[in-house]
Image: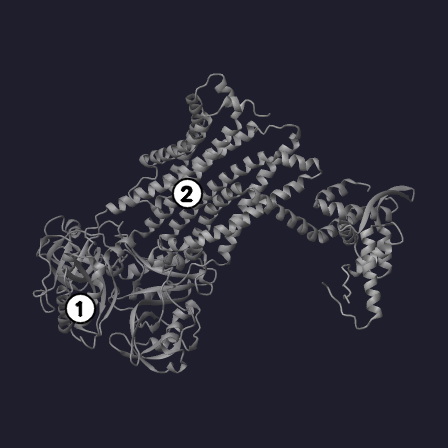
Amino acid sequence: MSKPRLPKLTHLQFLVLGLLRDGEQPGRQLRETLAAHGVRRTAPAFYQLMARLERDGLVEGRYEQITTGGQAVTERRYTLRARGREMWDQARDFYVAAAATGDVRWSDA
Amino acid sequence: MRSTRLARVLAALLPPRARRDLFEPALCDLDAQRHGRRANAARLILLFLDCWRVAPAEILSMFLKDLRHAFRLLRRDALFTATVVLTLTLGVGANVAVFALVNAVLLRPLPYPDADRLAVVEHRSRQTGFTKPFIAIGDHIDLRARQTVFEAFAGYGHGPIVVHGDEDIWEGEALTATEELFTVLRAEPFAGRVFDAADMHPNAARVAMLGYEFWQRHFGGDLSVIGRAVPLGMGRLPHQVVGIAPPHFRFPPTTTSDVIVPLRLPPAAPAARTSGWTFVVGRLAEGVTPEQAGAQMAALSQQMEQEHPEQNQGSEYYVKPLRDALVGDTRPALLQMLGAVGVVLLIACVNVANLLAARSIGRRREMAVRVALGAGRRQILMQLVAESIALGVVSGIAALAFAYWTVPALVSQVPASLNLNANQSIAFDGTVLGFAALVSFGTALAFGLFSGLGLRRDIAAATLTSSRGTTSSTARRASSALVVAEIALAIVLLASAGLVLRSFASLLAIDPGFRADGVLTASVAASPQRYPDEASRAVFQRQVFDAIRALPGVEAVGSAAVTPLTGNTWSAPLDRVDRPSPQGQRPPEVGWQAATAGYFSALRIPLLEGRLFDDARDTPGSAPVVIVSAAVRDRHFDGASPIGKRVRVGDSEAEVVGVVGNIRRSTITDQPWADLYFPQSQSPSLSMGLFVRTASDPATLAGPLLAAIRGVDPQVLVRRVEPFERTVRESTQVTRLALWLLGVFAATALALAAVGIYGVMSYSVRQRTRELGTRVALGATPLNILGMVMTQGLRLTIAGAVIGLVGAAIAGRALASLLFDTQPAEPFVLVGAALVLALTAMAACYLPARRAARVDPARTLTLPG
């Protein structure tokens, strides 16, 4: 039997991708949700995380103009890509399997 | 993103990726949070700073990518890379090698705490200008009591010693020191104690300290040696060991201190103030400069001069930082060499600049494509910086290897008095590595940015549509200007090398007044127990001479107290008995030497009048006699024969029996002194400096000589057996060092200049192929084309030569302290340097010119573009 593989996603990445599974979201909102989970990041640190996810092809970002308070502003919005979804699923499976079997032996190969 | 001016400015100050990935989306959030109201300056600045906090990881990852790309590019363009790396290796490597030497000799701290405050006191005679590194004991005692500028003031001396073990005899170096020396040097004993005031009393028990390394080597690190009596010296006098010096302790720092014994001075200045000498070193009081200390020494010298006019008239004491005293005339030579090697680096830089400029022109299309694909200026600049750093890394490593292999050759040219090998002082420590990194990266980076700036202009032109790779006239002019600069710099170095060569030739042409070739020297010391009186010492001396004379090939053997050209400045006041100096006036100083008749024969010092010493006639009991040099006759006897005249030296009188030729006694560049020679046969000494003339190679006589002396007395101490020519050679070593280095630098500069001019002319010919083809098609002969290209090269050479000659005249003045009997702007040398360079440049031009002359119009005119 092949050993379950350690997920390549960090906890934070797992969390962000999980939030994006429900559909496109602006970066500002993602940050607020993370903060609600107790994960506080400055805007540059958060967008560095998002830029790396983009670079790895897990999410896709784009700018969109919205209106707030009667003013037009631009915001960065993110969508989960297929590869991101696949990686998240793999990670989730791993955690589920790990939770189900106490004596699971991990492999990072 | 709503953009304010501040936001735009701050964004521009960020690396592109940080700007795009971090700053811009975060700024959008800021705007959205404030419902479209613009963020204030404080928030913007905080955001900007936060981006910089996060950015380094981004920048590093980008830069590593650029660096990998740069290495790939350099590997692809192997010829270019090899040329740049070789050029920078020569330039940077030579600089690192010379810097390593300068670091070891001039920069590295002396091995004592707060060593900048250590200074020596030396003596100068106002009448003769002679200087001595030691001072009279009487004056030392008075200076020590009266001075206030040193917090500690110590006397010391050093020389060879023998230490008698239970079964063995070990030779070593002894340091004699007053108790203050340990305070001056802030040295704490490894074990036991250092000397105290009681040890300095004339009647105190004999005590000694052992050097840590000597103690480890010969006593196995056994601490029980403290308290034991160890016999020292040829007299085997037992000395109680009171302490072990700390590890690596030595003084002076150019020697070793195996055994340390007290230097016992009389409690008060003796009446004969100038009998006995001591070296002096002191630690300057806090806040006192060497100049201030020197001023007080000068004032005290005057005071003592007034108190003791007969003995101190014309005597003055001065202060010199310890490092200056150790380094001597090597300091200006090394600094000048550092300047010269800097010029080599400049030439290498000019070559690299030319190569990079040529390459950047070739890469205009590549860069234009990158701009068209969205690369910003900063990205392109970063790529070029990455390429420069890649070049810097490779060149820096190669330069360090080059310097590592060059330094031993360099050290072999350094004056032996600095004792660099013995102390393993040359090391590639942090300072040298830092210097290497600074020079190689600085050079590569500067030229990366230089070519980047050139590219920016090219990118602006965005010559994507042009398929021709012709250079602009500005680029060609810049390239030509660089070659002119290179030629000028090469001429400066060539002329400098020429001046030092000329000076060296002048030094070699000096007649020192004696012949050093074929002479072997040795230093011999015998035991006072075995030879307690003058009679027994005279017998020992005669037996040694007879034994050596019996060796095959030996033509003459003699001995003397002072070896010429070792910087020795022993002198004595000379008074004529028939015409004494006026009352209260100190008689003039002349050189002092004690010798046997064989000394004059061995060194071929000619007898001009009278006779040489006669061992059978000039014995300890006979009337004192003296031989004078021709300078004594000319200066003190008005050129008349002094034979039979009596002279007074100190308290004794002697009759002049002979006049010999002048010799250069202290250094080869000194004017011949007026010298007095006293016969060693009238006061035989336990130590002799032997001079043996042989018909064969003196080096081959070393073994038989040693055996012959040991045959007379197996317990005798024989040291420094070496050909006298080595000593003579050492006296010109600073000039040799300068000549050797400048010669290497000049040859490197010449080669680099040739490569530079060849590169520029080849490139120019390649760029003008179509033009040359057209000329040939219109009727120009190959000879016309050859002449045209050669003229272009000649113009650059002449322009460089004119500038270079002005620079060489200025550099000559800077080299003045190294020059002997040579003018700083010697026309012969300047013209010679210009000619050598012009010929080299023309040879470098010829190959491209010949290629130009062979241009085939039928082919070149059908080339695309």
Q: Which residue type carries mark 2?
A: Thr
Task: Tell me the subunit letter for badge 2.
Answer: B
Q: Which residue is mark 1?
A: B708
Coordinates of residue B844 in the picture (x, y in percent): 42, 33
Question: Is residue B103 left or right of B515 when viewed as pictured?
Answer: right
* Residue B86 vertical position relative to residue B580 in the rendered view, above or below: above
Tell me the element at label 1: helix
Q: Amino acid at mark 1?
A: Ala
Q: Nearer the viewer, residue B831 or B567?
A: B831
Q: Secondary structure at mark 2?
A: helix
The chain containing the residue under callout 1 comes to B
Residue in the image at 43% along x and 57% along y? B104
Judge from the rendering whether residue B591 lies leftward or rightward of residue B419; answer left or right: left
Q: Which mark is residue B748?
A: 2
* Whole-percent x, y for residue B698 in the image: 21, 59
Q: Which residue is the extreme one toward the front?
A: A1
Q: Nearer the viewer, residue B628 or A7?
A: A7
Query: Mark 1 or 2 closer to N-term?
Result: 1
